Image (spheres, rainbow, N blue to C red):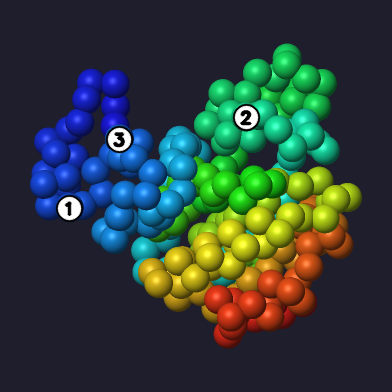
């Protein structure tokens, strides 16, 4: 929604039970007509655009992030993804100045789920990347950030939430593959790193049938 209020189209969308403005709805509102997930806290990011027409969303990309690195508190991640991070607030933020990035989802250490971008749309999380010969993974993937730093184990609550997220996403998107950012951008990225328990995730019933071909 713009500053001038809902457009006629948005009002029509609401009456029709359509997408409307995600930021105006409370947590847990059902949204079967969009890629906004019930149960996620919505923090709409401007950093997204449309996917190419006709593309199947068949890849889930797992990342980790913490800001500043190694600190698991505060709101710097959501500030980064909404272009509200004050680069002067911490030396580690300076290199992030002017970045326009996002992920669809963030799972915090206690399992809280945040959503920044409609999963039907293209978030800007993977960058230069290649999956099984297909480049520009943002086109056909959903990006999930786990709050972490590559040195600490991820939490039980995060694994639980990730499993439930995968189940919810599969109700709408034909996910077939799962990969780490490091898998699709080797040499440039290494997340989610060796602390991420792939075997455990792949063994979960909600993830059954998804493959990680690395
Ligand atoms: Zn990443």
Kindly report the distance in space between the C-alpha atoms of the residues bearing marks 1 and 2: 32 Å
Tell which circle, 1 or 2, labels the residue nearer the N-terminal end. Answer: 1
Whether residue 155 is situated above or below residue 204 in the rendered picture = above
Q: x, y percentage for residue 85?
A: 62, 24
Whether residue 78 is situated above or below residue 85 in the rendered picture = below
Q: To which residue does mark 2 refer?
A: 75
Apparent side of residue 193 relative to residue 30 in the rendered image (left or right): right
Which residue appears at 73% of the width and 14% of the height?
88
Asked which quadrant contains residue 185, the reply is: bottom right
Whether residue 100 is situated above or below residue 48 in the rendered picture = above
Tell which circle, 3 or 2, labels the residue nearer the N-terminal end. Answer: 3
Residue 207 visible in the shown view: yes
Classify mark 3: residues with Cα within 10 Å, few (<14), some (14-19) or many (20+).
few
Residue 80 visible in the shown view: no
Whether residue 170 is situated above or below residue 158 in the rendered picture = below
Check disc 3 and report its element: helix, strand or loop: helix
Asked which quadrant contains residue 37, the reply is: bottom left
Q: To which residue does mark 1 refer?
A: 17
* Pick the front one: 195 or 186: 195
Kindly report the distance in space between the C-alpha atoms of the residues bearing marks 3 and 2: 20 Å
Which residue appears at 69% of the width and 72% of the height?
201
Check disc 2 and report its element: helix, strand or loop: loop
Apparent side of residue 54 relative to residue 195 in the rendered image (left or right): left
Badge number at residue 197: none
Classify mark 2: residues with Cα within 10 Å, few (<14), some (14-19) or many (20+).
few
């Amino acid at each position: 929604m713009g500053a001038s209020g809902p457009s006629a189209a948005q009002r029509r969308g609401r009456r029709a039970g359509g997408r409307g403005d995600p930021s105006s709805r409370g947590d847990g509102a059902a949204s079967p007509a969009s890629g906004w997930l019930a149960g996620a806290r919505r923090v709409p990011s401007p950093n997204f655009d449309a996917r190419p027409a006709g593309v199947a969303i068949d890849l889930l990309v797992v990342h980790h992030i913490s800001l500043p690195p190694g600190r698991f508190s505060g709101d710097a991640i959501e500030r980064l993804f909404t272009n509200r991070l004050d680069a002067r607030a911490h030396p580690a933020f300076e290199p992030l100045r002017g970045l326009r990035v996002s992920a669809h989802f963030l799972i915090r250490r206690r399992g809280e789920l945040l959503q920044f971008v409609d999963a039907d749309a293209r978030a800007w999380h993977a960058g230069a990347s290649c999956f099984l010969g297909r480049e520009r993974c943002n086109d056909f993937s959903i990006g999930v950030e786990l709050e972490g730093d590559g040195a600490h184990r991820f939490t039980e609550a995060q694994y639980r939430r990730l499993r439930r997220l995968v189940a919810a996403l599969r109700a709408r998107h034909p996910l077939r593959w799962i990969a780490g950012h490091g898998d699709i951008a080797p040499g440039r990225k290494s997340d989610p790193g060796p602390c991420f328990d792939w075997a455990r995730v792949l063994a979960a019933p909600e993830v059954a049938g998804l493959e990680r071909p690395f």
